[in-house]
Image (cartoon, rainbow, N blue to C red):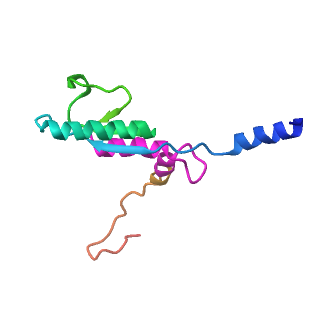
């Protein structure tokens, strides 16, 4: 391999976007659920981990109160929090850090204060 080929390989590696890790969102069964539901849930978690997915579990149980804790799984109190993490892992369409950064920059705008109006609903000068 010549020096030019090595340099081209390094440039290609630098410009290629890294693959996006798959995101698997699961809901934890209630604590009083049947053992079959828990077995099915554990099976889904293991399948997702075997695929190499980022496993997120929505659970109402606080982290410290959880009797069984899997260190390869991220636990969230709500689906909204989990979706925020998912958006932070997705690539940006505009070259920002992530899709979440795109959404935050879109949400930031200029705030317009209330304009005084008369009783007919027309702007007062």
Task: Tell me where residue 55 appears, x and y as whole percent.
Answer: 37, 38
Q: Residue at 63% across / 45% down in the picture?
A: 17
Residue 98 on the magenta span: yes
Q: Is 68 situated above or below 46?
A: above
Task: Locate residue 60, reporting x and y percent.
Answer: 20, 36
In the rendered view, tell whether residue 113 sits above or below residue 77.
Answer: below
118, 45: nearer the viewer: 45
Q: Could you say which is closer to the camera, residue 122 or residue 40?
A: 40
The residue located at (44%, 46%) in the rendering is 87
Q: Residue 117 location in percent, x, y?
A: 32, 69
Dominant SS type (magenta): helix
Residue at the (88%, 39%) spot, across then down: 4
Is residue 103 toward the left or the right of residue 59 in the image?
right
Is residue 36 toward the left or the right of residue 69 in the image? left
Where does residue 86 sit, x and y in percent of width and height?
A: 42, 44
Query: Does the magenta portion include 93?
Result: yes
Q: Which residue range is magenta in the image?
A: 78-104
> Total number of numbered labels?
0
- Look at the image and tell me whether residue 24 can be seen: yes
Q: Is 2 on the left or on the right of 74, as rendered?
A: right
In this rendering, the answer to whether 29 lies above or below 95 is above
Task: Name the quadrant of the C terminus.
Answer: bottom left
Q: Left or right of 83: which side holds 62? A: left
Q: Quadrant of the N terminus?
A: top right
Residue drawn at point x = 10 percent, y = 35 percent:
32
């Amino acid at each position: 391999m010549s020096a030019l080929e090595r340099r081209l390989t390094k440039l290609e590696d630098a410009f290629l976007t890294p693959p996006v890790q798959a995101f698997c969102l699961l809901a934890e069964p209630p604590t009083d659920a049947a053992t079959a539901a828990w077995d099915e849930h554990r099976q889904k978690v293991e399948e997702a981990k075997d695929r190499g997915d980022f496993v997120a579990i929505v659970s109402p149980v606080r982290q410290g109160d959880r009797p069984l804790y899997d260190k390869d799984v991220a636990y969230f109190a709500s689906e909204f929090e989990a979706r925020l993490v998912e958006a932070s892992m997705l690539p940006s369409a505009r070259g920002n850090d992530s899709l979440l950064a795109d959404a935050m920059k879109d949400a930031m705008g200029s705030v317009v204060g209330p304009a005084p109006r008369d009783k007919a609903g027309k702007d007062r000068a």
